[in-house]
Image (cartoon, rainbow, N blue to C red):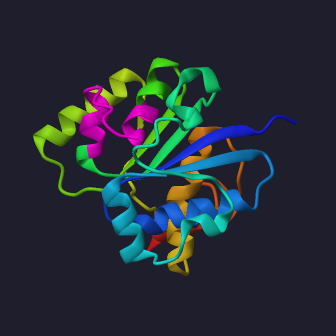
Amino acid sequence: MSRMKLVVGIGGASGAPYARRLLDHLAARDDVEPAIVFSVNGRQVWAQEIGTDPRSYGFPVYGHRDFHAPFASGSALYRHMVIVPCSASGMARIAHGVSDDLLGRAAEVMLKERGKLVLCVRETPLSQVHLRAALLAAEAGAVVMPAAPSFYTHPASIEDLLDTVVARILDHLGLENDLMQRWGSAPARLRAIEGERS
Protein backbone atom coordinates (compact mmCIF):
# COMPACT_ATOMS: atom_id res chain seq x y z
CA MET A 1 0.00 0.00 0.00
CA SER A 2 1.41 3.40 -0.98
CA ARG A 3 1.58 5.97 1.77
CA MET A 4 0.32 9.52 1.34
CA LYS A 5 3.20 12.02 1.40
CA LEU A 6 1.75 14.86 3.47
CA VAL A 7 3.22 18.24 4.32
CA VAL A 8 2.00 19.57 7.67
CA GLY A 9 2.64 23.30 7.81
CA ILE A 10 2.30 25.08 11.12
CA GLY A 11 1.77 28.80 10.79
CA GLY A 12 2.02 31.70 13.18
CA ALA A 13 -1.57 32.11 14.33
CA SER A 14 -2.80 30.99 17.72
CA GLY A 15 -4.15 27.45 17.34
CA ALA A 16 -1.14 25.16 17.72
CA PRO A 17 -3.35 22.66 19.63
CA TYR A 18 -5.07 21.90 16.32
CA ALA A 19 -1.70 21.01 14.81
CA ARG A 20 -0.74 18.95 17.84
CA ARG A 21 -4.00 17.01 17.69
CA LEU A 22 -3.57 16.38 13.96
CA LEU A 23 -0.04 15.08 14.53
CA ASP A 24 -1.30 12.87 17.38
CA HIS A 25 -3.69 11.17 14.96
CA LEU A 26 -1.19 10.96 12.10
CA ALA A 27 1.29 9.26 14.41
CA ALA A 28 -1.21 6.43 14.89
CA ARG A 29 -1.66 5.82 11.15
CA ASP A 30 0.44 3.74 8.79
CA ASP A 31 -0.97 5.15 5.56
CA VAL A 32 0.59 8.62 5.81
CA GLU A 33 4.16 9.88 5.60
CA PRO A 34 4.08 13.33 7.23
CA ALA A 35 6.75 16.00 7.02
CA ILE A 36 6.55 19.11 9.22
CA VAL A 37 7.50 22.69 8.44
CA PHE A 38 6.97 25.72 10.69
CA SER A 39 6.88 29.36 9.84
CA VAL A 40 9.13 31.47 12.07
CA ASN A 41 6.18 32.66 14.13
CA GLY A 42 4.62 29.19 14.02
CA ARG A 43 7.59 27.79 15.92
CA GLN A 44 7.19 30.53 18.55
CA VAL A 45 3.47 29.92 18.94
CA TRP A 46 4.04 26.16 19.25
CA ALA A 47 6.57 26.80 22.02
CA GLN A 48 4.10 29.02 23.86
CA GLU A 49 0.92 26.95 23.40
CA ILE A 50 2.33 23.40 23.36
CA GLY A 51 5.85 23.55 24.76
CA THR A 52 7.01 20.12 23.58
CA ASP A 53 9.60 19.27 20.94
CA PRO A 54 7.71 18.50 17.69
CA ARG A 55 10.52 16.12 16.70
CA SER A 56 9.23 13.74 19.36
CA TYR A 57 6.68 12.49 16.81
CA GLY A 58 9.48 10.99 14.76
CA PHE A 59 8.47 12.89 11.62
CA PRO A 60 11.06 14.95 9.76
CA VAL A 61 10.93 18.62 10.74
CA TYR A 62 12.34 21.11 8.22
CA GLY A 63 13.56 24.61 8.90
CA HIS A 64 11.68 27.54 7.42
CA ARG A 65 14.61 28.30 5.08
CA ASP A 66 15.45 24.72 4.11
CA PHE A 67 14.68 24.84 0.39
CA HIS A 68 16.43 21.49 0.01
CA ALA A 69 13.36 19.87 1.62
CA PRO A 70 11.86 17.41 -0.88
CA PHE A 71 8.47 19.11 -1.00
CA ALA A 72 10.07 22.37 -2.19
CA SER A 73 9.90 20.83 -5.67
CA GLY A 74 7.01 19.31 -7.55
CA SER A 75 9.24 16.46 -8.71
CA ALA A 76 9.18 14.95 -5.19
CA LEU A 77 5.51 14.03 -5.72
CA TYR A 78 4.09 15.51 -2.53
CA ARG A 79 0.49 16.21 -3.47
CA HIS A 80 -1.17 16.90 -0.09
CA MET A 81 -0.58 19.73 2.36
CA VAL A 82 -2.37 21.30 5.27
CA ILE A 83 -1.39 24.48 7.07
CA VAL A 84 -2.84 24.42 10.57
CA PRO A 85 -3.13 26.94 11.98
CA CYS A 86 -2.79 29.24 8.99
CA SER A 87 -2.44 32.92 9.79
CA ALA A 88 -4.34 35.45 7.72
CA SER A 89 -1.06 36.97 6.54
CA GLY A 90 0.20 33.53 5.58
CA MET A 91 -2.94 32.95 3.54
CA ALA A 92 -2.46 36.33 1.84
CA ARG A 93 1.13 35.53 0.89
CA ILE A 94 0.07 32.17 -0.55
CA ALA A 95 -2.82 33.78 -2.45
CA HIS A 96 -0.40 36.25 -4.06
CA GLY A 97 2.30 33.71 -4.87
CA VAL A 98 4.83 34.94 -2.32
CA SER A 99 7.09 32.01 -1.44
CA ASP A 100 9.86 33.61 0.60
CA ASP A 101 10.07 30.71 3.07
CA LEU A 102 9.64 26.94 2.88
CA LEU A 103 6.04 27.06 4.07
CA GLY A 104 5.07 29.42 1.27
CA ARG A 105 7.11 27.53 -1.31
CA ALA A 106 5.49 24.21 -0.35
CA ALA A 107 2.04 25.79 -0.69
CA GLU A 108 3.03 27.23 -4.07
CA VAL A 109 4.13 23.75 -5.20
CA MET A 110 0.77 22.26 -4.14
CA LEU A 111 -1.13 24.82 -6.17
CA LYS A 112 1.02 24.63 -9.28
CA GLU A 113 0.99 20.82 -9.26
CA ARG A 114 -2.79 20.77 -8.73
CA GLY A 115 -2.40 19.05 -5.37
CA LYS A 116 -4.62 19.36 -2.32
CA LEU A 117 -3.88 22.39 -0.14
CA VAL A 118 -5.96 22.93 3.01
CA LEU A 119 -5.58 26.28 4.76
CA CYS A 120 -6.98 26.02 8.29
CA VAL A 121 -7.30 29.74 8.94
CA ARG A 122 -7.32 30.94 12.54
CA GLU A 123 -8.20 34.62 12.60
CA THR A 124 -11.15 36.71 13.73
CA PRO A 125 -12.65 39.03 12.71
CA LEU A 126 -11.80 38.92 9.02
CA SER A 127 -11.08 42.20 7.27
CA GLN A 128 -11.79 42.87 3.61
CA VAL A 129 -8.11 42.19 2.94
CA HIS A 130 -8.45 38.75 4.55
CA LEU A 131 -11.65 37.96 2.67
CA ARG A 132 -10.14 38.95 -0.68
CA ALA A 133 -7.10 36.80 0.04
CA ALA A 134 -9.34 33.87 0.98
CA LEU A 135 -11.21 34.22 -2.31
CA LEU A 136 -7.95 34.38 -4.29
CA ALA A 137 -6.63 31.30 -2.48
CA ALA A 138 -9.85 29.39 -3.17
CA GLU A 139 -9.84 30.43 -6.81
CA ALA A 140 -6.24 29.16 -7.06
CA GLY A 141 -7.38 25.75 -5.81
CA ALA A 142 -6.88 25.84 -2.04
CA VAL A 143 -9.51 24.71 0.46
CA VAL A 144 -10.00 27.58 2.90
CA MET A 145 -11.17 25.95 6.12
CA PRO A 146 -11.55 28.23 9.13
CA ALA A 147 -10.71 26.52 12.42
CA ALA A 148 -14.35 26.57 13.47
CA PRO A 149 -15.20 23.65 15.78
CA SER A 150 -18.71 22.19 15.80
CA PHE A 151 -20.85 21.51 18.84
CA TYR A 152 -23.69 19.24 17.70
CA THR A 153 -21.69 16.20 18.84
CA HIS A 154 -21.61 17.59 22.39
CA PRO A 155 -17.82 17.44 22.76
CA ALA A 156 -16.90 16.49 26.32
CA SER A 157 -13.29 17.74 26.27
CA ILE A 158 -11.00 20.16 24.50
CA GLU A 159 -9.58 17.21 22.55
CA ASP A 160 -13.08 16.30 21.34
CA LEU A 161 -13.60 19.89 20.25
CA LEU A 162 -10.27 20.00 18.42
CA ASP A 163 -11.15 16.71 16.72
CA THR A 164 -14.22 18.24 15.07
CA VAL A 165 -11.82 20.41 13.05
CA VAL A 166 -9.12 17.74 12.62
CA ALA A 167 -11.73 15.31 11.27
CA ARG A 168 -12.70 17.79 8.56
CA ILE A 169 -9.04 18.34 7.68
CA LEU A 170 -8.55 14.59 7.28
CA ASP A 171 -11.76 14.39 5.23
CA HIS A 172 -10.48 16.95 2.74
CA LEU A 173 -7.13 15.21 2.53
CA GLY A 174 -8.95 12.00 1.63
CA LEU A 175 -8.05 10.19 4.86
CA GLU A 176 -10.85 8.14 6.39
CA ASN A 177 -11.38 8.71 10.10
CA ASP A 178 -13.90 8.32 12.88
CA LEU A 179 -12.78 11.22 15.06
CA MET A 180 -16.26 12.68 15.37
CA GLN A 181 -19.86 11.62 15.12
CA ARG A 182 -21.16 12.40 11.65
CA TRP A 183 -24.22 14.51 11.11
CA GLY A 184 -27.12 12.26 10.19
CA SER A 185 -26.10 9.44 12.50
CA ALA A 186 -28.89 8.36 14.83
CA PRO A 187 -27.69 10.05 18.06
CA ALA A 188 -27.03 13.38 16.35
CA ARG A 189 -30.37 13.21 14.54
CA LEU A 190 -32.23 12.43 17.77
CA ARG A 191 -30.54 15.31 19.57
CA ALA A 192 -31.51 17.66 16.77
CA ILE A 193 -35.14 16.50 16.94
CA GLU A 194 -35.19 16.84 20.71
CA GLY A 195 -33.81 20.35 20.35
CA GLU A 196 -36.63 21.30 17.99
CA ARG A 197 -39.21 20.02 20.47
CA SER A 198 -37.80 22.03 23.38
The residue furthest left is 128
* 40 relative position to 73: left or right: left
Q: Decide whether the magenta segment is chiefly helix, strand or loop.
A: helix
- Residue interval drawn in magenta: 90-107
Describe residue 103's horizontal placement relative to residue 3 as left or right. left
Eyeballing the image, is 67 above or below 63? above
Asked if the stretch drawn in magenta spans residue 98, the answer is: yes
Please state the horizontal and vertical placement of residue 68, each as a whole percent of the image. Answer: 52, 35
**What residue lies at 66% left-to-right and 65% top-to-bottom?**
57
Identify the residue shown where x is 60% and y is 48%: 35
**Which image quarter holds the C terminus?**
bottom left
Could you tell me residue 127's position as x and y percent? 12, 46
Q: Is residue 187 magenta?
A: no
Res 6 quadrant in image: top right
Task: Name the residue located 70 percent from the left edge and 53 percent from the top edge.
Answer: 177
Identify the image quadrant of residue 59: bottom right
* Front residue of this view, candidates 91 and 105: 105
Query: Could you tell whether 136 is left or right of 114 in the image?
Result: left
Residue 48 at x, y percent in the picture: 36, 76
Location of residue 13 in the rendering, given as x and y in whole percent from the top left corner: 31, 59
Q: Quadrant of residue 43?
A: bottom left
- Relative depth, front residue between 97 and 155: 97
Q: Where is 190 relative to 71, above or below? A: below
The quarter of the rendered structure image containing the N terminus is top right
